[in-house]
Image: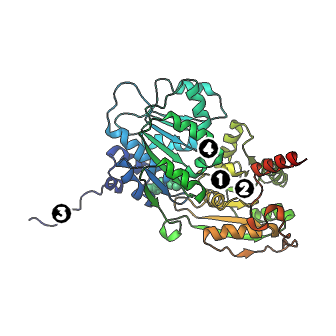
Amino acid sequence: MSGPRPAPAPVSAFATLGLTRSLQRACAELGFVEPTAVQVQAIPPALDGRDLIARAPTGSGKTAAYGLALLHRFDITPRTGRRVTRALLLVPTRELAVQAGQTLRSLARHMAEPVKVAVVFGGVSVNPQMMGLRGGAEVVVATPGRLLDLVERHALQLDAVQLLVLDEADRLLDDGFADELERVLALLPPERQHLLYSATFPPSVQALAARLLQEPVRVEVDAAPEAGGPAIEQHAVEVDTGQRTALLRRLLALHDWPRVLVFVATRHASEHVADKLQRAGIAAAAFHGELSQGARTRVLGDLHSGRLRVVLATDMAARGLHIPGLAAVVNYDLPRSPADYTHRIGRTARAGAAGVAYSFVPAAGEAHFRLIEKRQGQRVARERVEGLEPRESAPPPSPAEGGIKGRRKSRKDKLREAAAAAAAG
Ligand code: ADP
Ligand code: MG
C-alpha cells in the first residue's frame, strides 16, 4: 500500500439521498450545503414512490424537499414525444404559486432534458397562461380555482398526472378549498402518488388526509430550535385595543427592523393602520385579497426592495411566503387559530436566520392567546410598555360566543346566525 491518500473530493451531501447529479449541482449553486432534516427524511421515500405526509417547521426547506423528489423523477425517465403533465403542485395562494415555481425552475436548470414548469393562478389575465400551456408542461404549479378554469377551457389535461403535491396541505384540505379540491381530484387518474406538506396538520384535517393517502410514510420534524426549527424570539405585549397603533409605532421607533410584516384581522384594518403609519412618515402599505394582483405583487416587491418598511397584511400572507430579511412579525390582531399563529410568525427566522415575533394581547384576547400558547406547548411572558400600560379589563365571557371557546366568529358562523335569526323572525 502507498502512503496516505488525499481524501476524495467531497461529494454533495445531497448525493446520499439518491438524487441525480444535475439536481445536486443545482443545490450547490443555490448554496445548499447540507440537506435539511425534512429533506433527509422525506426525499428517499418520495423517490421510492411512497405516499407521504410531512410536517416540518416554517422555513425548513419543504419546497426543495418535494421539488427535488418531483424533478428527480423526470431526470431519470427520458422524455418521449409530447409534453404531458405528470406532476401537479397545488398551493393556496397566487404568491406561493409564483414562489414555488421559481424554486422548481432553479432546481431544474441543469437537468439533461429540460422540464417545463407552468405556473398558473387567478387574478391575472388567463390568456398568457393559456399560451404558456401550449405544447404542454410536465409540471404544473397552480392555485385550484384557476387550474379548474384552464381545464374547462381545454388548455390543460390532468389525466396523466402521476404525482400530486399539496403544499400548505392542511389549508388546501380545509373547508375553504374543499369543493375545488374535490373537483381537481376527480380529474386525476386514480393511480397516483401524493406528497402532503405543511408546518401544521390540525386534527380537523387528518381524517381527510388519511382518506387521500395510501399507507403513507409520516415525516415529523420537531419545531424546537435545538432540532433545527426556527429560532423565533416571541414576545407578548399587554395593551389596550385603542393603543395598538401607538404601540406599533413605538416598536418601529425602538428597533431598526428593516422589514416588518404586521398581521391584522381584516382588509379594512390593514388599510386603516397602513394609512395611519403613512401619515406618521413610515413607509407602509396594505396587503389583502381585494387588491388587484398587480398591487399585491407591487407591495411585496417594494417590501423586498426596501421601498416599504412595513406591510399590513391579512392572513393571506400567513402561509409559505419567503421574504428575505424579514426581521419581525407583529400580530396586531391575534390570529384566529393556533395553526395561523405558527404560520404567521414563521414568516421570520427562516432558513437559520434570526427573527422576532410580537403579539399584541388586549385583555379581551388574553383567554384566546392562552389557548394558542397551550397548543404551542410554550408560554410567552407578558410584557408591558411604559406609557402604554393597559387599563381595560377582560369582558365577562358572553354566553353567545361560548366564552372560553376563544375564537372570533367566522363568516360562516355569522351567516349561520343570520340564517337562524331570519328563520326565527
Ligand atoms: P418552508 O416551505 O419549509 O417554510 P422554504 O422551502 O420556503 O421553507 O425554504 C426556506 C429557505 O430555505 C429558502 O430560502 C430556501 O432556499 C432555503 N433552503 C432550502 N433548503 C436548503 C438547504 N438544504 N440548505 C440551505 N438553505 C436551504
Ligand atoms: Mg413552504
Q: Quadrant of residue 79?
A: top left
Does residue 141 appear anywhere in the picture?
no
Residue nearest the viewer, comparing 415 with 105: 415
Location of residue 219 with respect to 390 vertically, above or below: above
Q: Earlier in the sequence, mark 3 or mark 2?
A: 3
Residue shown at 32%/51% (left/top)?
18
Q: Earlier in the sequence, mark 1 or mark 4?
A: 4
**Rendered location of residue 179, percent (x, y):** 62, 40
Residue under label 2, please give it.
Answer: 263
Disc 4 target residue: 178
In the image, is residue 192 above or below residue 50? above
Residue most toward the front?
Answer: 424
Mark in the foreground, 3 or 2? 2
Query: Type of residue at label 4?
Result: Ala
Would you say 348 lies left or right of 102 here?
right
The residue tagged with tag 4: helix, strand or loop? helix
- Residue 149 disc label: none
Q: Position of residue 27 (x, y in %)?
A: 41, 49
User: Whole-Å distance between the Cαs marked 3 and 4?
Assistant: 60 Å
- C-alpha span from label 3 to label 1: 52 Å
Q: Mark 1 = which residue? A: 318
Residue underneath mark 3: 5
Residue type marked 1: Ala
Alpha carbon separation for disc pair 1 and 4: 20 Å
Pointer 1 or 2: first along the chain: 2
Q: Quick one: label 2, few (<14), some, or many (20+) residues within 10 Å?
A: many
Q: How is the image coloured?
A: rainbow
Q: List the single residue furthest toward the left.
A: 1
